[in-house]
Image (spheres, rainbow, N blue to C red):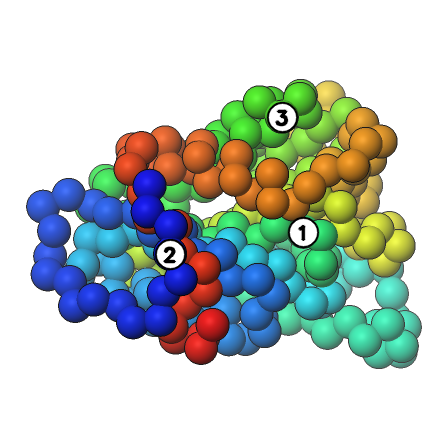
């Protein structure tokens, strides 16, 4: 593994094997993150390069293809008072509340290089995260068909992908220790898998009532996602030059 601060990307020729790069972005603006993801998706199939962005977002709600206004138990005025914007997005899955303490994982993967569908990519993404959670002592159940991962206290991860230029976009959102106050007003998955708890999303902190470090969770998740992408030798960068960080 190579760790570095990246401010100038090298010019790459089409490789014989797919390379994997993880970028730790901190807390970028949501719109800027979406634009970076679009640029990477346009390049991914040409370069054969898988890029995984990891970050946290300022508070907002996104509504995926299976979501609706009915998922949000707040009026427009109440959303405005809480400074919560609502954005409709093209990913699969339902409605998700984002905020600090939630790890967003965005794999931009050239699907044709791997021979995967969007569904296969989402399944591997959730399997990697679930394996990481199990390793850290959080028993859980992953279901790509239900777009998420569930633990004892409820849904811990919400997921949903789409693709652009045959490269995946969007990904998964893991609640580590977010502020849960506004989460009770949002229903992310109306029909959870059998045996799983419905209702508002939970978090790792609520699972075992013990402190959970974001840096630790992120590190273990990266390790297992790399394996799901078939790479034990990956690159880890802080920031991304297109974001100026």
Q: Residue furthest front?
A: 4
Give the numbered dot on residue 136: 3
Dot 2, how many residues are within 10 Å of its Cα: few (below 14), some (14-19), or many (20+)? Answer: few
User: Where is residue 243, by image quadrant?
Assistant: bottom left
Secondary structure at numbered mark 2: strand
- The structure residue drawn at horizontal position 60% and vertical position 38%, both measured from the top left corner, is 216
Q: Position of residue 110 (x, y in %)?
A: 27, 52
Quadrant that contains the N terminus: top left
Q: What residue is shown with label 2?
A: 4
Res. 90 visible in picture: no
Secondary structure at numbered mark 1: strand
Q: Nearer the viewer, residue 110 or 199?
A: 110
Q: CA distance from mark 2 to mark 1?
A: 24 Å
Give the numbered dot on residue 190: none
Which sits earlier in the primary sequence, circle 3 or circle 1?
A: 1
Which sits earlier in the primary sequence, circle 2 or circle 3?
A: 2
Q: Position of residue 157 (x, y in %)?
A: 64, 41
Image position of 114 (left or right of 245)? left
Q: What residue is shown with label 1?
A: 102
| Front disc: 2 or 1 | 2
User: Where is residue 202, by image quadrant?
Assistant: top right
- The structure residue drawn at horizontal position 56% and vertical position 43%, both measured from the top left corner, is 218
Dot 3, how many residues are within 10 Å of its Cα: few (below 14), some (14-19), or many (20+)? Answer: some
Q: Pointers 2 and 3 in contact (CB under 8 A)?
A: no
- The structure residue drawn at horizontal position 62% and vertical position 59%, both measured from the top left corner, is 56
- The structure residue drawn at horizontal position 62% and vertical position 34%, both measured from the top left corner, is 149
């Amino acid at each position: 593994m190579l760790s570095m601060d990246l401010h100038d990307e090298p010019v790459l020729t089409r490789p014989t094997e797919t390379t994997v790069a993880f970028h730790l972005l901190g807390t970028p603006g949501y719109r800027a993150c979406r634009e970076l993801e679009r640029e990477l998706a346009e390049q991914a199939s040409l370069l054969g390069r898988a890029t995984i962005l990891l970050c946290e977002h300022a508070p907002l709600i996104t509504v995926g293809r299976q979501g609706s206004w009915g998922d949000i138990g707040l009026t427009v005025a109440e959303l405005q008072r809480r400074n919560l914007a609502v954005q409709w997005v093209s990913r699969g899955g339902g409605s998700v509340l984002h905020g600090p303490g939630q790890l967003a994982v965005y794999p931009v993967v050239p699907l044709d290089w791997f021979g995967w569908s969007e569904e296969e990519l989402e399944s591997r993404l959730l399997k990697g995260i679930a394996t990481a959670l199990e390793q850290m002592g959080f028993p859980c159940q992953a279901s790509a068909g239900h777009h998420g991962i569930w633990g004892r206290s409820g849904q811990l991860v919400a997921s949903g992908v789409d693709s652009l230029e045959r490269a995946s976009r969007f990904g998964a959102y893991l609640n580590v220790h977010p502020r849960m106050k506004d989460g009770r007003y949002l229903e992310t998955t109306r029909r959870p898998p059998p045996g799983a708890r419905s209702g508002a999303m939970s978090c790792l902190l609520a699972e075992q009532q013990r402190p959970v470090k974001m840096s630790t969770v992120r590190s273990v998740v990266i390790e297992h996602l790399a394996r799901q992408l078939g790479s034990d030798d990956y690159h880890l960068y802080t920031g991304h030059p297109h974001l100026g960080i």
